[in-house]
Amino acid sequence: MDSALEYWTAKALLDWQIEMGVDEAIQDEPINRYDLADKAPQAAATRQGPATCNAGTAPAAPPAAPGPGDAIAAARQAAGAAQDLDGLRAAIAAYEHCDLRAGARNLVFADGIAGAPVMILGEAPGRDEDREGRPFVGRAGQLLDKMLAAIDMGRDRPEAPVYISNVLPWRPPQNRTPEKAEIAMMLPFVERHVRLAAPKVLILMGNTPCQALLGRSGITRMRGHWTQALDLPVLPMFHPAYLLRTPTAKREAWADLLALKAKLKELA
């Protein structure tokens, strides 16, 4: 019986394994590590053979992987060259130094109306966002839409629009917390994104955007207190995902929404 899988069946199985967090392939047959140890000296001698015949010629060294500083410098250069939001999205799509892109289905750039007076910056895409390629579309996103509607705002309301994005454009495995190195290399894109979107107020939802733009975390202490970043008024708030887990915090979230509405009236 032919056990070969059809292409789409095999691809579906691989997609499922990636979704479950599989990151390593294990062979069907066990490997005897003691045999490998016995063969190692012979393999080393084989590798050294050509060098003996070519005395004075050093073997070519493998290309060095870019360090964190190189990745950040490349991000800064690519972000600075973007002249508009479409150009910035293309620059992020072409950025190859962040390993998260290899395990993500889609680049999640932004949603809402560009040029809106309020820009919301979240942490990173989740499973639903990764599938649709838009930020805040899962349960947390649905709660965010209800929160905004309570103060007569929304991502699809031309009369009171909101613009939404994340610090990371690609989903981390198993929705883990973004690492400091990932935040650092994507920060130039975030800063350029804010400047090109040109909001009047910036909302930081959760610890990750606070860590990125304010250099500190501790959202339970920071929320509700206006501060400054990128020459803009900034209000840290609870992430909607936290509110789903901790409904008692919705009272503080409502107070923050009222503070946002008051700030917009003040700026108008």
Image (cartoon, rainbow, N blue to C red):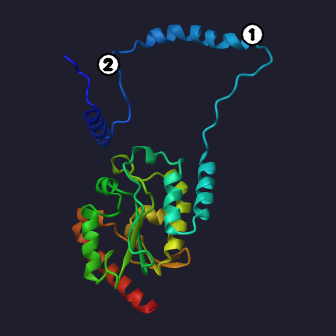
Type of amino acid under label 2: Asp
Q: Residue at x 28, y 66 (%)?
A: 141
Q: Residue at x 25, y 69 (%)?
A: 143
Q: Residue at x 34, y 85 (%)?
A: 159
Q: Depth-wise, is mark 1 or mark 2 nearer the camera?
A: 1
Of the pair 192 and 213, the residue shown nearer to us: 192
Image position, residue 251 (x, y; %): 26, 77
Whether residue 3 is visible here, answered yes or no, is yes
Type of amino acid under label 1: Cys
The quadrant of the picture occupied by the C terminus is bottom left
What residue occupies the far left of the structure in this picture?
Answer: 1
Residue 28: numbered disc: 2
Residue 53: numbered disc: 1
First in sequence: mark 1 or mark 2?
2
- Mark 1–mark 2 distance (CA, rounded to whole Å): 39 Å
SS state under label 1 = helix
Figure check: 37 above or below 112:
above
